[in-house]
Image (cartoon, rainbow, N blue to C red):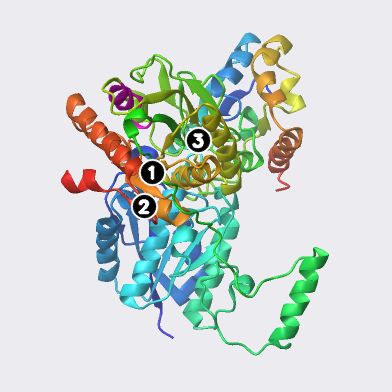
Amino acid sequence: MSKKRIVHYLNQFFGGIGAEAKAGIPPMEFREAKGPGVDIQEKIGARGEIVATVVCGDNYFTENMEKASNEVLEIISKHKPDIVIAGPSFRAGRYGIACGKVAAEASKRFGIPTLAAMNEESPGVDLYARDTYIVKTGSSVASMDDAIEGMSRFLLKIIRGEEIGSASVEGYFARGIRKNIFAEERGAKRAVDMLVKKVRGEKFETELKMPTFTRYNPQPPIKDIHKAKLGLVTSGGIVPKGNPDRLEASSATKFLEYSIKGVKDLTPDKWETAHGGYDPTYANEDPDRVLPVDVFRDLEREGKIGKLHDKYYVTVGNGTPIRRAEGFAKEIAKKEKEAGVDCIVVSSCCGTCTRCGATLAKEIEREAQLPVVHITTLVPVSKTVGANRIVPGVAIPHPLGNPALPFEDEKKLRRKIAEEVLIALSTQIEQQTVFRRVFEVA
Amino acid sequence: MAVLKGKKIIVVGDRDGVHGEEIVSALKKLGYDVSYSATECFVCTAAGSMDFPTQQRIAELARGKDPSDFAVILGVCDEEGATVHARTVTTGDPSRTGALSRVQLRLPVYHIFEQEIKGQIDRGVYSQTIGLVESSLDEGEVKKTIDVVRRIREGRD
């Protein structure tokens, strides 16, 4: 058996370049195994060789997925791989999306087996589990040993050409592929057995898994936006300077309510981000880049909206489990409703943050029966989770700004996004809709 | 007092737990000298790994030295984070990426909530800062966090 050629995809951290500050780097290649790849190489021995490692920044990849994945795939194709592997990416949102996309695209374009590894809470699973094998891992590098073991074992199976068993047996995420097998019992008996177990409250394994994300019909639009009271919510962690209530940087256990009464602009001397999932530099320079108070105050003053609600709600969406986000949404919806808010804007930043924000958007919309717009750069994640009205953001660490522009131009850009939000809130939609006008014009 | 007395103390706090500066100020009050202190933040893109510069500084301080001359105090307040930080300074960086990957420093590592450490810090200072964090946490999680640090320190992990 000839030695299999393997190409490994890693993000900028696991490729050894740097953490958040280096998340913008374009793809680069190394003709050797790196980071966890070194251990995977040791485990598979002479049967395969990691001939190259492709490293790319998480923001670079996820802010422009088609372009970045083309660039990564081009580098990968040069090395004529038999197998492409990616990660492990654990619970990391952007990294999980990038690993899933690279593995799925490589499988589609080159017709070769591909393998990623991540945690069930990664949005990469929701987006790509059908298109590539994704081995299950724990949520952080604390479980790196198991992740390396799991990936290597699976990789060896692929190398040896062994048959891959069902998802539950092999420890990967179900791909939604139905395979005919000979079962011991006939279907009717299996169904009744399951039903009996269900009635008794016992554990049973369904043979037909349903997708986990529920969808709700979009709420009707605002009839007269000029009179509407608009509420702001963010999963991007904007809090008063010093983070007085110690909102967690990751896996937040709470959401908080703060007053913006009389506040025309979020200034860096009074406000900051508590979020640990993106480079905080830009949000700390100008927190309006994540929570756009300044432009909505302008719109309020000009009579383009009736009123901006004087309280906003904030959590850190980084690593927040879906169930917890649903709980936050219920309470926020109640508070917004009691305050007479007519429509809501939710802004999000990184991968798991967008997953949390999209959950807030769809659950608040259902619970409060009000139209909600979700602003995020990671539109595919928001769509998968089920936000109904989506407006694309500029970039992960600054969805409502662009630090490269002079301040006046940057504010104009933020204003355009805010105006797009108002259009989204006023438009009748029958299904999920992405309002892209800003970036088509830009 | 043997745990900290005469040791080169390294403090690795955590944004979501006890901050590095809070531990340092409690130690300084009793005259301890801290060789290096950092406050880590769970970074999503790094899946919770210890930051590269922190690993680099610890490597420079402790590589090739006698581990028993050191004491590392952690401030992270969840089991998973404590596992990563404690392993990084004992059996090596689990991410296999930083300056401490595949480096076994075997430094004696403690959690700020452990009796060995708590008992050596001024009670007044403790209750003003660190104790507030401790009392806001779930008791079960605190115990699990302390236990995992102890297991890793004793090589039972």
Farthest right residue in view: A200
Q: Amino acid at mark 2?
A: Ile
Q: Are marks 1 and 3 in contact (CB under 8 Å)?
A: no
- Residue B80 % position (x, y): 62, 43
The earlier-in-sequence mark between 3 and 2 is: 3
Residues at marks 1 and 2 on the same chain: yes
To which chain does the residue with label 1 belong? A
Which secondary structure, mark 1?
Answer: loop
Above or below, A411 against A438 in this view is above
Where does the magenta region start and end?
Answer: A289-300
Residue A246 sits in quarter: top right
- Residue A386 % position (x, y): 46, 53
The residue singled out by tag 1 in the image is: A221
Above or below, A391 against A144 in this view is above
Q: Are marks 1 and 2 in contact (CB under 8 Å)?
A: yes
Q: Amino acid at mark 1?
A: Pro
**Residue A299 in magenta stretch:** yes
Residues at marks 1 and 3 on the same chain: yes
Rounded to the nearest whole Å, what is the CA distance between mark 1 and mark 3? 28 Å
Main secondary structure of the magenta stretch: helix
Q: Identify the residue at horizontal 31%, vertical 74% (top origin).
A: A109
Q: Are marks 3 and 2 in contact (CB under 8 Å)?
A: no
The residue singled out by tag 2 in the image is: A429
On the question of residue A38 being in view, the answer is no
On the question of residue B141 being in view, the answer is yes
Which secondary structure, mark 2?
Answer: loop
**Residue A390 in magenta stretch:** no
The residue singled out by tag 3 in the image is: A316
